[in-house]
Image: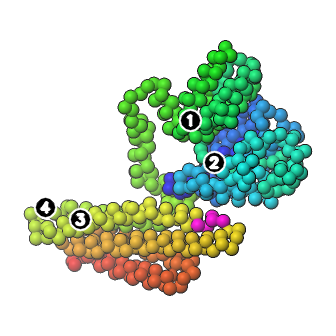
Amino acid sequence: MSDQPLVECVPNFSEGRRADVVEKILAAIRGVAGVEILRSEMDADHNRAVVTFVGAPGAVAEAAVRATARAAELINLDEHQGQHPRMGATDVIPFVPLRGTSLDDCVALARTVGRRIGEELGIPVYLYEAAATRSDRVNLADVRRGEYEGLQKDIALPKRAPDFGPTRVGPAGATAVGARAPLVAYNIYLNTTDIEVAKEIARAVRFSSGGLRFVKALGLLVGGRAQVSMNLTDVTHTPLHRAFELVRSEAERYGVAVAESEIVGLTPEATLLDAAEHYLRLNRFERDQILDRRLAALDRASPVGFVERIAEATPTPAGGSVVALAGSLAAALAQMMAGLTVGRKRFVAVDQEMREILAQAHEVRAELLRLVDEDATAYQTVMGAYRLPRNTEAEVEARQAAIQQTLTEAARTQLAVAENAVKALRLLRRAAPIGNPNARPDVGVGALLAEAAARGAVLNVNVNARSLTDPDAARRLCETAEAAENEARQLAAEIVELVKTGHP
């Protein structure tokens, strides 16, 4: 999943006591290719399960719908009791932008998923946070006010009409679907059983009551202990340690203390590092001092790491990146041949030419390595264009124009791969008869790699060109690509023959 666009989904299900039920919901998520479950947690007191999974936007959307359908079959809100507010079997589905995706992408995703849940599953859906269509539904607490029981009575009222789905509530309840930035779910337990103390502290901490700007908080009784349950919606501006200190300070006013705290689900690494730096009073600490980070960077940069990323069941990196890498390896072999030749007395007659080949091969190699990442980016932009809304005629036209533009750019990226692979072949052809003969077999390997890179890239150009509505643009791309492929075939054949026979 390393270079593909990633979205995080953190659905909350109203079941925290029956592990077999939660496992069936998880199985529905696992059944979608390209989705990875990062964590799942159950809480018996809340009677709630929180699942975190990631993947490409389309795959994540499908998994969310399937999980909601399974939860509706297995969870009956008429029989549900728990400490946490809830209105649905699948109570809430937030989409969170990660790599290569934006909050706007997640808004579009939330609305698509919300419509599917409403129309296909017959479950009322309310859009919230960034996906909300009404100002009074931005805050999840406002959407969920009255919970399942209250919604049963009020859903027929105009102010409570869902964004999608029926205006009636079945035993699966209703679902809130939204888009938001990453948040940290953080609970602090107090050494008291007095829930009123927890409620007063929550009132002092949450922003809506005059507390910290990016904090939502409730006071609950969990496991016989008072708990301040918080969502920190922007830990870059309201860090974890600041929320902790305010809760601790407020608790002292009531003669109680913090017993322990917990993070529910996943949290960005920086959140914990910020707290560590604060409490340890670290001075001049650089985060690249963290050993695990340095080791992870080495793993990502290794050939094994790249091959493993290719092997994943994800759209990128894929064939386009592979052919660019093959071309860069061909250029590297040309560079190697030149490096083994320059500065040696026996090759003084060709020293200047080999230095030129060395410099040019370096440039071609760098360009092809850049195209490894650019191909993955091009794919992401094409998929982004296909995800654009098409509810009005203007939106349909804008979407089609974006699709055509991104497909053209994707084809041009692969054409650049083919053309640079041909440049590598020209350098290999120049180097083969005059360079160090000990490296001549390596030149032959480079020729085969470069030919494969050029032909594979041309294949991708032709595939993209077929989807273009401008026949002249498609023809020009294909003709240029064909010329590159023909030259690549000819040069590779000449180099291989030279390597086999030893004669230019």
Q: Position of residue 212 (x, y in %)?
A: 61, 33
Q: Image height check: is 253 above or below 423?
A: above
The colour scheme applied to this rendered structure is rainbow
| Of marks 3 and 4, the one in the foreground | 3
Mark 1 residue type: Thr
Give the CA separation, mark 2 to mark 1: 16 Å
Give the CA separation, mark 1 to mark 3: 51 Å
Q: Badge 1 is on which residue?
A: 238
Give the CA separation, mark 1 to mark 4: 60 Å
Q: Residue at x 83, y 34 (%)?
A: 81
Magenta segment, which residues?
385-389
Q: Position of residue 178 (x, y in %)?
A: 69, 50
Q: Badge 3 is on which residue?
A: 359
Reading the chain from its start, which is encountered first: label 3 or label 2? 2
Q: Residues within 10 Å of mark 4 (few under 14, many from 20)?
A: some
Q: Badge 4 is on which residue?
A: 343
Q: Are marks 3 and 4 in contact (CB under 8 Å)?
A: no
Reading the chain from its start, which is encountered first: label 1 or label 3? 1
Q: Using the image as rendered, state which of residue 342 and residue 478 is in the foreground.
A: 478
Give the CA separation, mark 3 to mark 2: 48 Å
Q: Position of residue 125 (x, y in %)?
A: 78, 52
Mark 2 residue type: Arg
